[in-house]
Image: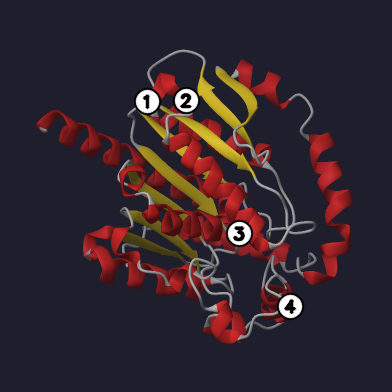
């Protein structure tokens, strides 16, 4: 593992935050009936998001990009050079969330890496089978890679996903291998604590009531509820479970797993298979000590250090892509 180093004060801050999380509800199947009202509350809380971004020097727009109605949110610097594109896929357990929920993280990435970000407003599994969510992300990726933004034609592209978005990002990368010319434009993937095995990795299967953020005992039943009619073998088929896919055509990746996250085996095993497929330097893995699921959204120094590492990794990959283009 290529673990980041954290000082004692940073680790103690996370432990203190975990003690607060321990007193809070865990999210799981029991909250699924609340997903619609929570989604409405989230949208109300996002009022004025575009104006806030404009004050930070970022222009936002939303666009429909496919015949099926897939919508994306495009964030770009109001001035300055764009060196690469990022396809962002938000989390939310497949049943909650939208592209705007990552505005803060995406704005920081734009400032740090000189990129434009396209975030997918995929349909949610409340009304749509999981395949529909995967199809939406693939449609958005193909649109972007086929120069859906002609002003950025030819720029390298990154795929970023967190939690459920990490699963959808990995599944999208696998499906894009059917279009090799498009897939070659993708120079990197940033994957935060995703789900890569719908049959349940060991850490999911042994998760108990002492988990943080996520309801441990409800994790495996949730994965089964999202994949009705499938047995364990069916749930292990790629791209539904990217862990079992042919990873030889994948781009280099940086992956983050959280020690206090019951999903951590997904990322650790995925990184090992990624390295086996494309080489030891093809997957950088960080296991974050004491960290709970969702760490990058929390007001913690560890979150800042994690996103700073992902930004540095993206910048290095952009430089390498540009050097390669100049050489050829």
Q: Residues within 10 Å of mark 2 (few under 14, many from 20)?
A: some
Q: Are marks 2 and 1 in contact (CB under 8 Å)?
A: yes
The nearer-to-camera label among 4 and 1 is: 1
Residue 21 placement: quadrant: bottom right
Asked whether, in this view, residue 83 is left or right of residue 17, the answer is left
Q: According to the image, label 2 marks what residue?
A: 149
- Residue at image mark 1: 153
| C-alpha gap between disc 4 and disc 1 | 44 Å
Q: Earlier in the sequence, mark 3 or mark 1?
A: 1
Closest to the camera, between mark 2 and mark 3, is: 2
**In this rendering, position of residue 146 left or right of residue 67:** left
Q: Quickly name the residue at label 4.
A: 218
Q: CA distance from mark 2 to mark 1?
A: 7 Å
Q: Nearer the viewer, mark 2 or mark 4?
A: 2
* Image disc number at residue 182: none
Give the mark nearest the N terminus, 3 or 4: 3
Question: At 53% from the left edge and 67% from the top edge, which residue is drawn?
Answer: 290
At mark 1, the secondary structure is loop
- Res 268 quadrant in image: bottom left
Question: On screen, 103 above or below 248?
Answer: above
Identify the image quadrant of the C terminus.
Answer: top left
Secondary structure at numbered mark 2: loop
Sequence order check, earlier mark of 4 and 1: 1
Q: How many marks?
A: 4
**Residue located beneath label 3 in the image:** 164
Can you give x and y, in whole percent of width and height, for residue 303 in the image? Answer: 52, 50
């Amino acid at each position: 593992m290529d673990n980041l180093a954290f000082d004692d004060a940073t680790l103690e801050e996370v432990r203190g935050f975990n003690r607060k999380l321990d007193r809070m509800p865990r999210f799981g199947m029991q909250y699924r009936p609340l997903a619609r009202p929570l989604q409405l509350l989230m949208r109300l809380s996002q009022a004025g998001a575009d104006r806030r971004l404009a004050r930070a020097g970022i222009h936002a727009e939303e666009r429909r990009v496919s015949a099926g109605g897939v919508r994306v949110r495009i964030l770009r610097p109001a001035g300055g050079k764009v060196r690469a594109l990022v396809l962002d896929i938000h989390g939310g357990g497949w049943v909650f969330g939208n592209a705007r929920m990552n505005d803060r993280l995406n704005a920081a990435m734009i400032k740090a890496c000189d990129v434009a970000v396209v975030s997918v407003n995929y349909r949610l599994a409340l009304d749509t089978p999981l395949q529909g969510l995967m199809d939406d992300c693939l449609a958005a990726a193909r649109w972007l890679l086929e120069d859906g933004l002609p002003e950025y034609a030819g720029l390298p592209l990154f795929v970023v996903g967190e939690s459920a978005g990490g699963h959808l990002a990995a599944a999208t990368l696998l499906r894009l291998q059917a279009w090799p010319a498009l897939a070659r434009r993708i120079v990197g993937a940033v994957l935060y604590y995703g789900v890569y095995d719908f049959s349940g990795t060991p850490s999911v299967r042994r998760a108990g009531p002492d988990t943080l953020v996520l309801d441990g005992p409800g994790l495996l039943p949730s994965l089964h509820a999202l994949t009705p009619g499938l047995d364990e073998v069916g749930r292990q088929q790629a791209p539904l479970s990217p862990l079992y896919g042919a990873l030889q055509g994948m781009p280099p990746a940086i992956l983050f797993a959280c020690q206090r996250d019951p999903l951590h085996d997904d990322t650790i095993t995925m990184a090992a298979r990624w390295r086996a497929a494309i080489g030891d330097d093809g997957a950088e893995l960080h296991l974050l000590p004491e960290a709970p699921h969702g760490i990058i959204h929390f007001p913690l120094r560890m979150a800042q250090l994690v996103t700073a590492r992902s930004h540095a990794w993206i910048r290095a990959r952009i430089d390498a892509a540009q050097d390669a283009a100049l050489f050829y």
